[in-house]
Image (spheres, coloured by chain):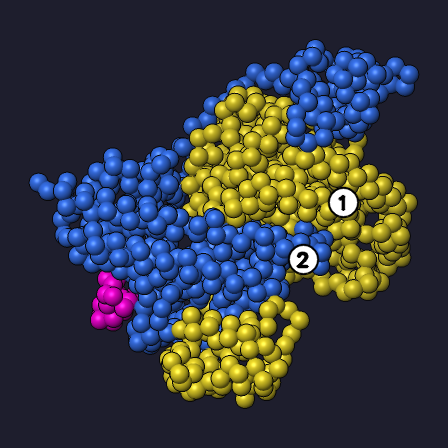
Chain colours: A blue, B yellow
Amino acid sequence: MFNDFKVLDEGPVYVQLKKYVQDMIVKGHLLEHQKLPSTRELSKLLTVSRNTVLNAYAELEQDGIIYAVKGKGHFVGKVTTLKTSSIIEMDWKKRLNDTTLLADEIDLIRQDIHWQKGMISFISIAPEEKLFDVENFKRAFLTRMSIEGDIVLNYGYAKGYKPLIDYLLGYMEMKGVDISNKDIMITNGFTEGLDILLSSFAKKSGRVLCENPTHHAALKLFRMHGLDIHGIDMSDDGVDIGQVEQDLAEKQFDFAYFIPSYHNPTGIVTSSEKRNAIFQLFSKYQIPIVEDGFNEELRYTGSHLAPLIAFSGSGNNIVYIGSFSKILFPGLRVGWILADKELISYLESMKRARTIHTSTLDQAVLYQYLQDGYFEKYLKKARSVYKKKYELARQACMQYIPFSRITGDGGLHLFIELEEGVDARILLEKCYNKGVVFYPGDVFFTNGRGNNTFRLGFSRLSDEDIIRGIQIIGDTLKNDMRG
Amino acid sequence: MFNDFKVLDEGPVYVQLKKYVQDMIVKGHLLEHQKLPSTRELSKLLTVSRNTVLNAYAELEQDGIIYAVKGKGHFVGKVTTLKTSSIIEMDWKKRLNDTTLLADEIDLIRQDIHWQKGMISFISIAPEEKLFDVENFKRAFLTRMSIEGDIVLNYGYAKGYKPLIDYLLGYMEMKGVDISNKDIMITNGFTEGLDILLSSFAKKSGRVLCENPTHHAALKLFRMHGLDIHGIDMSDDGVDIGQVEQDLAEKQFDFAYFIPSYHNPTGIVTSSEKRNAIFQLFSKYQIPIVEDGFNEELRYTGSHLAPLIAFSGSGNNIVYIGSFSKILFPGLRVGWILADKELISYLESMKRARTIHTSTLDQAVLYQYLQDGYFEKYLKKARSVYKKKYELARQACMQYIPFSRITGDGGLHLFIELEEGVDARILLEKCYNKGVVFYPGDVFFTNGRGNNTFRLGFSRLSDEDIIRGIQIIGDTLKNDMRG
């Protein structure tokens, strides 16, 4: 007894001892009312200081796990005996609803090819960790904590952390948005923003219009919310406006979802003319648009393009969801919804009911980081690194891959369309055997198409791996995909 | 032009200048292709360094907002003119579903009495900010960031941050839980945990059984999920077992929700015997229990009580939701669901679809804080402070308030039941006029009762205010509530 206690490097010794004793009691090795060794004995036995034992016993006593009898020492307290007779095995799957089973079924992570270490993976479009500006992030944290550490650590508001909201309102105003009748609610990233919207919108036609292909996380949520998804083909400057026009004339839609700024997965930037056309059309039909501001900060060339919500002026028909996740720190779950004031007020009630509020710590540190100008500096650095990788990847694709179309006007990935009939999943299988993996494009399509497409994320790869990987994909296409 | 530019204390000057110029362009004060002042001119005009102007222009150029012509200077780029003709005013309320309108309607924050500064408020049960262990929290942050800052800031896993999950599994094992067939998923606090469960459970009877009164955030979610809520009255050691027995025999339930450890709002701790009885009954009827581990760390007296999930042994019929929010840092939104492994795997897909994952920063810093033993130390301090306040508040209630029942075995609040017919909302109105507010109890009841009850949160009040406030409530009850 007690002789298997070992002092570890982590955490105070008295806490370790406390846990050790508690564990023995809970597991039944020490019995109710059994006398414990005196503090003197135990300190000698374990070669720890007597104070350590005193502290451990004091806490165990406070927790009601042991009790002291004056002049007699410490004893094991009343422990609920948990030798229960009923071991219940429920079949949980049968107790879950269809949405949950669907979420599981269409969960891409579970279907992912399990790539191994040493492989060249074009799967991720997460930012490169080595670029992270950890030092300035620490600085921002310490600054904010010294200003109002107690507020950062206590409850906040469902709508979000006020300084961050104000900063982002200013940020969006800089993009040409009339914020006079609008407000911002902070969410746990883009994904929660979209989910809250989908959970709040009334289902009338039950139909959503979006680009085809589109962001798979959005597709997943549309499916989970039981929406009928209506995809519009894309040309190189955005959706096919003629098709949109025709569909709006023929069908009812509850809302549209667009990623005009840097489209996922195609990387297409919707032109200013098309933005205007989209805005006019949906205004005419009084159908709201949910605009996904994805990665608009990561364009490397071209003139400034106003987001769709800027076109609405003092109107309220566009709901914008923003996030810095793909550029800054995805580990911080912070996104925002910019929309009509009244709408935000309703969404706020939903947010409060569902998660109370987004981490104040995340919001406060992000605010300080932005406010101190670190974001601009970081963006500059990140842009120059990613731009080089982008150009390299694009050039390699031109050189090695026999594509029928390549898109991607910036950002952290390219999208490749192969000849009709070439199956990207078979290509993936063959490349996998050669140590290269990428994202099959079919998962982004609304209608089961896209078998001949794939996405290449290059943000986390070295220059050498980008070239070598693309070369391998190209060679495989040329040599192993016939017959 | 340019003469209203003012250098502020916050952030680099070149960023401020960049924003200023961008703002003028976006607002149309500078026109397309208009020449900008040379960097030399502008630096002189604004009395900022030339480098500042150079940096600002360089960034504006990179953003595509201005362009440079060699030997000629900088010019305003192509700006989308946003003088849109369609200003759309949608009636958003009509486009929202009933759940959202209900969430708004039952949002307590909106109904709250708007207390003013200087008032004595017994409304909050959030922890006292002055107690926060900000220094050790900073330490934990810096430690974790130096170990793996880049990982903390990048994407994590839907299930949560592995070191934290492992820590919490050990923590729950210490409470007597058999974790062999169980797993933990980290959530954005208790609330998201419950919401994900409610969103995942299949609706069969559509009926939930719970204590009456119970946690209002849970009640709100039950209502939003369209559940039929069946409340069981409470005696001083937990629910009325006879009533539970009868109800289970007569009706179908999808699941039960219990707060055995420190019940909100009554503060009742369910006895070991009742825990066992509850477990046996629900096992017999094969109805799962969702156990809310609310504040079990904040009991000041009594022996260790095993949570309900410990009774299930290697069975899987109890789902436990935990959180340190009320004790540690509510601003960090971290809670956890401990349950059957297979169930956790399904919940993980839901979590991934809805919020991707909980802030890695929050999880990682919390982990380090726990791991370094700061939690135990803090808990010790917090317990001793809150215990004093608790005893003071309880004593003051005994002395001044003519209650018919008072409950609360620890924690941060007491629950008062007045004589039948005494309306706590009228009492609140009268106390409000004297500068004292508290939480009316009716909001916690499943069936519209509880008009004669209220909750007193004392965690954030000084000793003097606790006594004075309770005295005022007592006096008001004795003097102003007749006739």
**Which residue sits furthest bottom?**
B1
In the rendered image, residue B157, in percent from the top left (x then y), is placed at: 47, 41
Q: Residue at x 82, y 38 (%)?
A: B384
Q: Which residue type carries mark 2?
A: Thr
Residue at mark 2: A143
Residue A283, above or below A118: below
In reply to whether residue A239 is colored magenta, the answer given is: yes
Any part of residue B455 in sight: no
Q: Which mark is residue B413?
A: 1
Q: Chain of mark 1?
A: B
Q: Residue at x 20, y 40 (%)?
A: A426
In the rendered image, residue A120, in percent from the top left (x then y), is placed at: 33, 42
Q: In whole angstroms, how far apart are the C-alphas of marks 2 and 1?
A: 34 Å
Residue B125, above or below B8: above
SS at badge 2: helix
Any part of residue A308 in sight: yes
Q: Are marks 2 and 1 in contact (CB under 8 Å)?
A: no
Q: Residue at x 51, y 72 (%)?
A: B55
Question: What residue span does the magenta drawing correspond to?
Answer: A229-253
In the rendered image, residue B286, in percent from the top left (x then y), is placed at: 50, 27
In reply to whether residue A39 is colored magenta, the answer given is: no
Q: Quadrant of residue B230?
A: top right
